[in-house]
Image: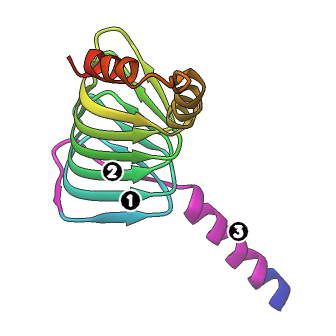
């Protein structure tokens, strides 16, 4: 008797984590939204969105604020700060403005991407390349001064 009740509780708990939250077209949310599940946004969110699940922003979807998550597919508009541990995929109708910190970026032709972007993987590679490509110190002080002038000019 008790074992069948436990199985029902466990299975309903799993379903809650795999279900998708939907913010429908015509819906406007002002404030913070936090969830462990995935999101489909076709309405407007003004505030902070934080989730461990995937976020899909449809053609009519708009987010103004901060979005923290793993993977996001954009067809709509975003303005603010985007912090992702995974991939940002921009469809041809996407319009992104603001500050973006991601791991990977995929952009279809036609998408608008007006943002300052930093990529986690690229930052490490650049710092290693910079160390390798730095010129060796020259004992002549006049050469060092000339090189410094050339870089700043």
The outermost residue toward the bottom is 2
Image coords of residue 65 (percent x, y): 21, 51
Q: Secondary structure at mark 1?
A: strand
Image coords of residue 10 (percent x, y): 71, 74
Q: Earlier in the sequence, mark 2 or mark 3?
A: 3
Q: Nearer the viewer, residue 139 or 128?
A: 139
Label 3 sits on residue:
11
Q: Quadrant of the N terminus?
A: bottom right
Q: Earlier in the sequence, mark 1 or mark 2?
A: 1
Image coords of residue 43 (percent x, y): 22, 44
Q: Is residue 13 left or right of residue 50?
A: right
The answer to whether residue 81 is above or below residue 14 is: above
Q: Quadrant of residue 7?
A: bottom right
Q: How is the image coloured?
A: rainbow
Q: Quadrant of residue 15?
A: bottom right
Q: Secondary structure at mark 2?
A: strand
Q: Does 8 lie within the magenta span?
A: yes
Q: Does 27 lie within the magenta span?
A: yes
Marks 1 & 2, CB-CB < 8 Å contact: yes
Q: Which residues are magenta?
A: 6-30
Residue name at image x 27 percent, y 47 percent = 81
Q: Earlier in the sequence, mark 1 or mark 3?
A: 3
- Residue 50's disc is 1
Dot 2: few (<14), some (14–19), or many (≥20) neighbours within 10 Å?
many
Dot 1: few (<14), some (14–19), or many (≥20) neighbours within 10 Å?
some
Q: Nearer the viewer, residue 137 or 108?
A: 137
Image coords of residue 39 (percent x, y): 41, 49
């Amino acid at each position: 008797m008790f074992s069948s009740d436990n199985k029902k509780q466990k299975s309903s708990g799993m379903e809650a984590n795999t279900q998708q939250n939907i913010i429908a077209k015509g819906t406007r949310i002002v404030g913070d939204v936090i969830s462990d599940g995935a999101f489909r946004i076709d309405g407007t969110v003004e505030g902070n969105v934080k989730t461990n699940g995937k976020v899909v922003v449809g053609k009519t979807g708009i987010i103004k604020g901060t979005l923290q998550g793993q993977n996001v597919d954009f067809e709509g508009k975003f303005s603010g700060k985007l912090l992702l541990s995974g991939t940002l995929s921009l469809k041809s109708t996407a319009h992104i403005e603001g500050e973006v910190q991601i791991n990977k970026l995929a952009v279809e032709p036609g998408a608008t991407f007006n943002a300052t972007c930093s990529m986690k993987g690229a930052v490490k590679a650049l710092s290693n390349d910079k160390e390798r490509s730095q010129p060796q110190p020259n004992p002549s002080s006049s050469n060092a001064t000339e090189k410094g002038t050339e870089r700043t000019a």
